[in-house]
Amino acid sequence: MKSENPPKTVRRSIALPYKLIEEVRTVAPAALRENLNRLVTVALQDFVTQRKKQSFEESMAQMAADPAIRTECAILSKEFAIAEADGLKND
């Protein structure tokens, strides 16, 4: 039985305020000004990228605030400091 591949494109009809479209066309790169479909695609890709970045930064902040992780990092830092000085002479 042949498996179906998901479509590469999904068509959606959306309503956008005219004022927003005019404003977007004034700030969009020339290559995107007249191609609203491409402009929306690029904007959604940027949105996804920003959300992933924000999610990562929030996760890092949570880890940095975790006492167990902070303790482990301090231990590792101390161990690396010892290893970094290994073989160096104190003058």
Image: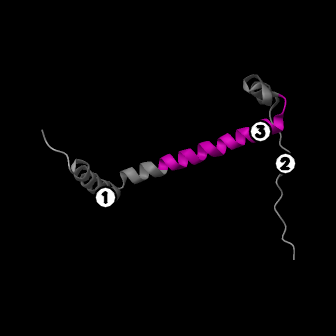
Front position in the image: 90 or 70: 90
Q: Quadrant of the N terminus?
A: bottom right
Q: Residues within 10 Å of mark 1 (few under 14, many from 20)?
A: few
74 sits left or right of 2 in the view: left
User: Which label is found at residue 12?
Assistant: 2
Distance from disc 3 to disc 2, alpha carbons, whole Å, reads: 11 Å
**Secondary structure that dominates the magenta span:** helix
Dot 2 falls on a residue whose secondary structure is loop
Between disc 1 and disc 2, whose residue precedes? 2
On screen, residue 79 above or below 29: below
For residue 52, the mark is none
Question: Reading the chain from its start, which is encountered first: label 3 or label 1?
Answer: 3
Gap between marks 1 and 2 measured at Cα? 49 Å
* Residue 36 painted magenta: yes
As shown in the figure, which amino acid type bears the numbered disc 3?
Val
Q: What residue do we see at 84% from left, 29% from top?
A: 34
Q: Find out whether the residues at labels 3 and 2 contact each other: C-beta distance under 8 Å.
A: no
Density class for disc 3 (Cα within 10 Å; few <14, some 14-19, many ≥20) is few
For the record, the magenta segment spans 34-58
Give the residue at x 77% y 39%. 40
* Residue underneath mark 1: 72
- Give residue 85's position: percent from left, percent from top: 22, 48
14 shown above or below 9: above
Residue at label 3?
40
**Which amino acid type is marked by label 1?**
Glu
For numbered disc 1, what is the local secondary structure? helix
